[in-house]
Image: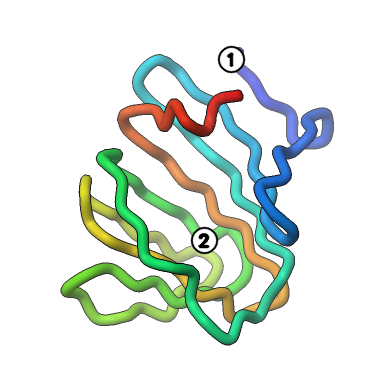
């Protein structure tokens, strides 16, 4: 698939308040992640994965946490990067947020 039209696609409902849309090639994946259950009183649990990740905050506000780094308050237009194996998470500060995540290699567990 070489295109994904937002208005013509159905999101995957990961859980209540979390939807994602995915496009990928053999070596790169981009994921639109929409959160609609904020603001949160607690951060999500920390997690790590072997994939490198970059994220663009398209809308909303979050706090980004990454092991051994100070927490970062990020808003629309900001970005963060996560090296392979680093524990990280976010806390949603606004009612909604959209993150655009890119992964290398592809997160095969996201492909249905």
User: Where is residue 89 shown, x and y percent of the image?
Assistant: 40, 66
Circle on res. 90: none
Relative to 30, 11 lies left or right: right
Q: Which residue is mark 1?
A: 2
Distance of mark 1 from mark 2, alpha carbons?
Answer: 23 Å
Q: Is residue 15 above or below residue 72?
A: above
Q: Which residue is mark 2?
A: 57
Label 1 vs 2, first from the N-terminus: 1
Residue at screen point 52% across, 82% down: 42
User: Where is residue 20 shown, x and y percent of the image?
Assistant: 64, 43
Relative to 108, 105 lies left or right: left
Q: Quadrant of residue 39?
A: bottom right
| Label 1 with label 2: CB-CB less than 8 Å | no
Residue at screen point 62% across, 58% down: 98
For numbered disc 1, what is the local secondary structure? loop
For numbered disc 2, what is the local secondary structure? strand
Q: Is residue 30 above or below residue 78?
A: above
Q: Is residue 12 above or below residue 47?
A: above
Please state, as top left, top right, bottom left or bottom right, where the N terminus lies in the image.
Answer: top right
How many numbered marks have been drawn onto this rendered protein structure?
2
| Color scheme of the displayed model | rainbow
Residue at screen point 78% across, 30% down: 9
Q: Quadrant of residue 81?
A: bottom left
User: Where is residue 93 shown, x and y percent of the image?
Assistant: 59, 81
Neighbourhood count class around disc 2 (C-alpha, 10 Å): few under 14, some 14–19, many 20 upward: many
**Residue, far bottom:** 41
Please state, as top left, top right, bottom left or bottom right, where the C terminus lies in the image.
Answer: top right
Residue at screen point 49% across, 35% down: 30
Relative to 41, 96 lies left or right: right
Of 14 and 64, the residue lying toward us: 14
């Amino acid at each position: 698939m070489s295109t994904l039209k937002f208005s013509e696609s159905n999101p995957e409902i990961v859980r209540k308040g979390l939807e994602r849309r995915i496009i990928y090639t053999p070596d790169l994946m981009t994921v639109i992640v929409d959160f609609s259950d904020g603001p949160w009183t607690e951060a999500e649990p920390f997690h790590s994965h072997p994939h490198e990740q970059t994220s663009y905050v398209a809308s909303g506000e979050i706090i980004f946490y990454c092991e051994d780094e100070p927490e970062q308050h990020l808003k629309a237009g900001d970005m963060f990067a996560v090296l392979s194996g680093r524990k990280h998470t976010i806390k949603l500060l606004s009612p909604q947020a959209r993150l655009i995540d890119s992964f290398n290699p592809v997160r095969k567990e996201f492909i249905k």
